[in-house]
Image: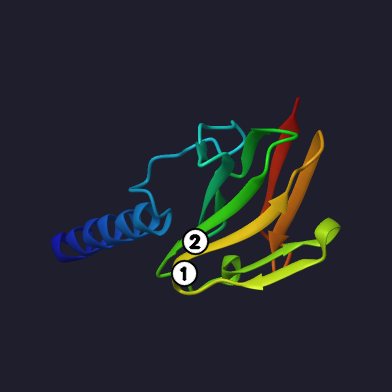
Amino acid sequence: MKFTLVSILIAGVFIGGAVLLSRGNGGVQTDTSVPINNVSMVDGKQIIEIRAKGGYQPAKSVARSGVPTILRFNTSGTFDCSSSVRISSLGVSKLLPQTGTTDIDLGVPKAGVLQGTCGMGMYPFEVAFQS
């Protein structure tokens, strides 16, 4: 009886730890629907940085319209479908390296929302361009 109780307790600890680790951020829930400050200006170009691994973070970005813009994807050991990026409205389909950065030149975007997804359509992201 004592052995069974200890076994169940140990199994619960292992399962709980696996669930926390599988979230990829130490078990801390983050709200990917809230835009964060991932946009910077470098040499007159707007750089929007998005991390690609297990989806896209942040999933929503806000940037200025009318400014030359680069969409930069950062990967670090990315082996899932987020290593394939599609932006249908621009006819863009790119395979990202497992580790590194990939820049997509967006030109000078007009006001509106740019939507993209992974190659399988499971992980969406968007950039809202505002005046």
Quadrant that contains the N terminus: bottom left
Tell me where residue 89 sits by quadrant: bottom right
Of residues 24 and 36, the one drawn nearer to the viewer in this rendering: 36
Quadrant that contains the C terminus: top right
Residue 70 horizontal side relative to residue 13, left or right: right
Q: Earlier in the sequence, mark 1 or mark 2?
A: 2
Q: Position of residue 87 (x, y in %)?
A: 76, 59
| Residue at which label 2 appears | 53
C-alpha separation, residue under disc 1 versus residue under disc 2: 5 Å
Name which residue lies at 65% across and 34% down: 63
- In this view, the residue farthest toward the top is 131
Q: Secondary structure at mark 2?
A: loop
Name which residue lies at 34% across and 60% down: 18
| Residue at which label 1 appears | 78
Q: Position of residue 19 (x, y in %)?
A: 39, 56
Vertical placement of 130 versus 17: above or below?
Answer: above
* CB under 8 Å between discs 1 and 2: yes
Q: Residues within 10 Å of mark 2 (few under 14, many from 20)?
A: many
Residue 56 horizontal side relative to residue 66, left or right: left
